Amino acid sequence: MRENSRPLLIGITGNIGSGKSSFCAYLEALGYRLLYADRLAQSHLYDLKDLWVQRWGKRILEGDQLNRAAIAEIVFDNPDERQWLNSQLHPLVLQDFQHEVEHSKEQYLFFEIPLLFEAGLEQCFDYLVLVCATQEAVLQRIMERDKSSEADILKRLRTQMPDSEKAARVDLIIDNSFSVDELYRHARYLAAKITGIPHKVVSPFNA
């Protein structure tokens, strides 16, 4: 596939509480096609129920259905189990991404990937965007949304690559420490900017 015959590929990332999903929702409202890594992973999570039961037993079931909270409890504090889970799900999500790239008729494709850098995917995109916010803003958002304690949120944040490391590797940084109107302004700015973003030579997702 020639580089300029495929959609322009724009990766959007950010840590928990940054507001990246809200930013992506604004882009969708502007008419762009968004692919969400977490949503695809959740879909495949249910597809592979038998594999999880084989690994962790029936404690992860609620009746005949998967209990996602039970799986999250297993993998959150156990890096080995988390890595194994990701090793099963990530290849399937990457296959989905590559299929979209090869078959989409869109001019632009946006991808929301929380662990974009951790998964080594930065070479798969023409343009990278980081959505970030101050720790104060992040804590307030997550405590209001999840009713989590500050200690639990800080623990989750420590498992993620710091914004400062990601910021040095992206093309655009969006500070979402302020109002929703400001975030929507950022989305409109990116929408206006993408017509001038060139295609790069990118790596396929399923390489």
Image (spheres, rainbow, N blue to C red):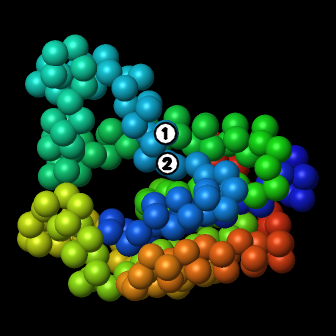
Mark 2 nearby-residue class (10 Å; few <14, some 14–19, many ≥20): some
Residue at 45% from the left image edge and 61% from the top image edge: 21
State whether residue 91 appears in this view: no
Query: Looking at this view, is 54 or 26 the one in front?
Result: 26
* Residue 156: numbered disc: none
Give the quadrant of residue 142: bottom left
Horizontal side of 38 relative to 106 (left or right) equals left
Residue at 32% from the left image edge and 85% from the top image edge: 134
Mark 1 nearby-residue class (10 Å; few <14, some 14–19, many ≥20): some
Q: Are marks 2 and 1 in contact (CB under 8 Å)?
A: yes
Residue at 22% from the left image edge and 14% from the top image edge: 64
Q: Which residue is mark 1?
A: 40
Query: Looking at this view, is 28 or 8 the one in front?
Result: 28
- Which element type, helix, strand or loop, lies under badge 1? helix
Residue 128 sits above or below residue 3 on the image: below
Q: Which residue is mark 2?
A: 37
Q: Position of residue 28 (x, y in %)?
A: 61, 56
- Total marks placed: 2
Q: Position of residue 12 (x, y in %)?
A: 55, 65
Name the amino acid, label 1: Leu
Horizontal side of 79 relative to 45 (left or right) equals left
Name the amino acid, label 2: Ala
